[in-house]
Amino acid sequence: MRRMVERWVSSIALAIAGIGLWWGVGQAANAIKVAVIDQQAVMEKSVAGKRALEELKSYSSARQKIIDQDDQELKELERNLQSEATAKLSDVEKQAKQEAFRAKLEAYQRRIQSFNQEIQAKQREMVAEYSKKIRDAAMAVADKAGYVAVLDKGTDATIRIVIYHQPGVDLTDQVVKEFDRQHK
C-alpha cells in the first residue's frame, strides 16, 4: 500500500511540477490552486469505504478464528505429549505422536502464511479499487472548485508529502460527500 501511495504522490508531484513549467517562470504562483485530501480519512468516513473496511475486517476475523482453532489443537497435542500417559508409551508410539504434532505445527504455519498472503492481496485489491474511486471523487470536487491539483496529505503511517497546508484547501470532507454520492 505504501508503494502505491508513494507512486501516486510522486505522479502528482511531477504533474504539479509540469503545471508550474507550463505556466512558465514569472507567472503568479497564486494562479495555481492546489488542494489536499486525506485518502485514509475518505476511506474511513465514507459509507462505501466503511463497508469495504468492515468486509476486510470480517474476512480477517474469519481467518483468525480458524488459526485460533488450530492453535488450540496444537496446545492440546502438546499437553498430550507432555502428559504422564505419554510417558508410559513406547518410544515408537512417542515418536509417532511427536511426528503428528510436528506435521500439525507445519500445517499451522503454512496456513498462517497462506492467510496472511490472502489478506494482503485483498488489501492491495481494495487499495487499488478505492484509490481510483477516491481519485474520481477528488477530481469531481476539484473541477467544480477550480483546483489544478489535489495532493494526499498523508498520515503518520504513510509518507507526508504535504508538510503544511492552510485548512481552507483541505477538501477531505467534500470528497467524502462526493464519494458517498458516487458510490451509494
Image (cartoon, grey):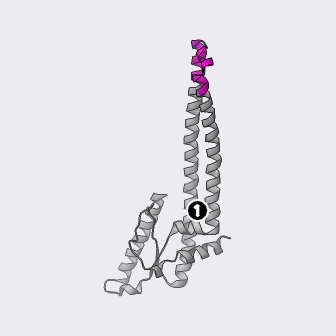
Report the residue at 55% width, 61% height from top. Answer: 128
Label 1 secondary element:
helix
Most foreground residue, 34 or 12: 34
Amino acid type indicated by mark 1: Glu
Q: Residue at x 54, y 68 (%)?
A: 41
Q: Quadrant of residue 89?
A: top right
Residue 29 locus on image (x, y percent):
36, 84
Tell me if residue 90 is in the magenta stretch: yes
Q: Which residues are magenta?
A: 79-100
Mark 1: few/some/many CA within 10 Å (<14, 14-19, 20+): few
Relative side of 184 to 94, left or right: right
Location of residue 166 (image quadrant): bottom left
Q: Position of residue 103 (x, y in %)?
A: 58, 28
Q: Which residue is mark 1?
A: 129
Q: Residue furthest left?
A: 26
Q: Residue at x 47, y 62 (%)?
A: 5
